[in-house]
Amino acid sequence: MLQKLPIGIQTFSEIIEDDYLYIDKTKPIYQLLTSGKYFFLSRPRRSGKSLTLSTIKSVYMGQRELFTGLWIENQWDWNKVHPVIHISFSGIGYQTQGLEGAIEAELRLIAEEFNVLLTQIGIDRLFAELIRKLSAKGKVVLLIDEYDKPIIDYLDDVKQAIAHRKILKIFYSVIKDSDPYIEFLLITGVSKFSKVSVFSDLNNLTDITLHRRYAALTGYTQDEIESYFGATIADLASERGQDYTDLIDNIRLQYNGYSWDGLISVYNPFSFMSFIDSGEFRNFWFETGTPSFLLTLLKEEWLYELNNMTVGEETFSSYDIERLQAIPILFQTGYLTIKEKHNFGLYTLDYPNAEVKESLLSYIIADLRKGQAALTRPMVFQLYEAFYANDMERLIDLIKGIFANIPSHIFIKEAEAYYHSLIYLVFFYLGQYAQSEVNTNRGRLDCLVQTPTHIYILEFKLDKSADEALQQIKDKGYADKYTADPRPKVLLGINFSSKQKTVEGWKMMEMTR
């Protein structure tokens, strides 16, 4: 029988003591603890950062009894006990107390737990005093979780984000001079802001975000999934009347795919365990929604073709609060991941998996349409049904409906960008259900949809004519490569009027060979 699942539980001692399932990550943790002193790790939310820090805390506190049967049990010197300063910026109450006041209160609370009296004034001097006085009990371990949350939470309020950045810079400034008192430091977060602006005095951090040795430090590998959950998945496959291998493939496509080296891919622990718990394919990671500032950035750049994107390594370095760029944020927050690493410092980025792809597309499409994200999937599925029923009248009505909610004055201002972006996104999303491809460039849109009974080749035009669209399909020979396929080919030319904000005309032609 599968142990209890620690969904939402981020404290290692609680997982072990209350007999929750723990996926043994102590080997890469050991490698980290024995390979250096100062580290930084960026990972998306709900990927296991907090549990990693909590596990490290228990190691340095010498709590050997918690590690019975785990890899590290007989590898670590459990006589090496150190005081641990563990600060999580997600739980210190900076939104009610103010960031500086919250940090001071947290430092005093930690000092009280160690029976240390702090006498200095100011968060930097208090922090330095706490480290120095605790070192009398042994060199200090510093674990700082979600260091960037006070900034991330205010990216739509740049003035406040900059103010928080300044406070954090003052706070971290004391760490380098406290080196004689420090045994180990790990700082984690979602993003990597410029070291100049946040860690200007802490320039000796080793960034392990893309390090091959720590590609599976957080998240679950395919081997871990099948080792720890294989029997449960087999039972679930039986309940669903599905082949075990097919279900494994479905789970992998839905939830696996995060990679930081282009070779090893992992599951988001929260999403996967939520699936195991419920037995249902849902988009668990996205239940809190997509930040509005990110949707704004994408629209400002009209950046919507995010799949198979080639970027330089500078994309991963950092980003600046005052000059936010969409691609670094998409990568660092988990909307995009590394699919392949090339020579010359080039990388291919793509959606990690179907969960992220479906959910992000739903929010982007809804944002452009001025609608609700919850209605995007039903709309796309209706397109799928129209194709499978070979109902072109219904298909055209649905395409018209895609643009219905957009206020005319907003649409007219960016008519071409709106039209091309929405058509691309909707048909790209349709590829989750049907075999659909859509190719775009500045001048045209063309689309291919295949069902068990038909092959549909569509050409879209803006402010031209349906005849011209249909003629282009024939002139360019878009259907030629499917000549040997016995399915009928339906050529569909569609013209959209930017003035009327709807489909102005459409023509179709069916080819039987």
Image: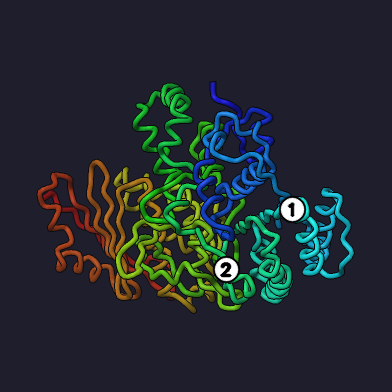
Question: How many C-alpha atoms fall within 10 Å of the one at disc 2: few (<14), some, or many (≥20)?
Answer: few
The one nearer the camera, 250 or 9, is 9
Question: Residue 207 appears at what percent x and percent y?
Answer: 52, 62
Q: Name the residue at 84% across, 57% down.
A: 108
Q: Circle 2 sits in a helix, a strand or a loop, which is it?
A: loop
Q: Is residue 505 left or right of residue 108?
A: left
Question: Residue 28 appears at what percent x and percent y?
Answer: 50, 46
Question: Residue 481 appears at what percent x and percent y?
Answer: 13, 56
Task: Please give the label number shown on residue 204.
Answer: 2
Q: Is residue 504 above or below residue 263?
A: below
The one nearer the camera, 453 or 509, is 453
Say which amino acid is labelled 2: Asn
Q: Is residue 77 left or right of residue 402?
A: right
* Residue 423 occupies quadrant: bottom left
Q: Is residue 14 above or below residue 488?
A: above
Q: Circle 1 sits in a helix, a strand or a loop, which is it?
A: loop
Task: Please give the label number shown on residue 378.
Answer: none
Which one is closest to the eye, mark 2 or mark 1?
2
Question: Residue 88 appears at what percent x and percent y?
Answer: 70, 54
Q: Is residue 330 left or right of residue 16?
A: left
Say which amino acid is labelled 1: Gly
Q: Could you tell me if the residues under marks 2 and 1 are in contact, i.e. CB atoms within 8 Å? A: no
Q: How is the image coloured?
A: rainbow
Q: Is residue 59 left or right of residue 112?
A: left
Task: Please give the label number shown on residue 91.
Answer: 1
The one nearer the camera, 96 or 223, is 223
Q: Is residue 460 visible?
A: no
Question: How many C-alpha atoms fall within 10 Å of the one at disc 1: few (<14), some, or many (≥20)?
Answer: few
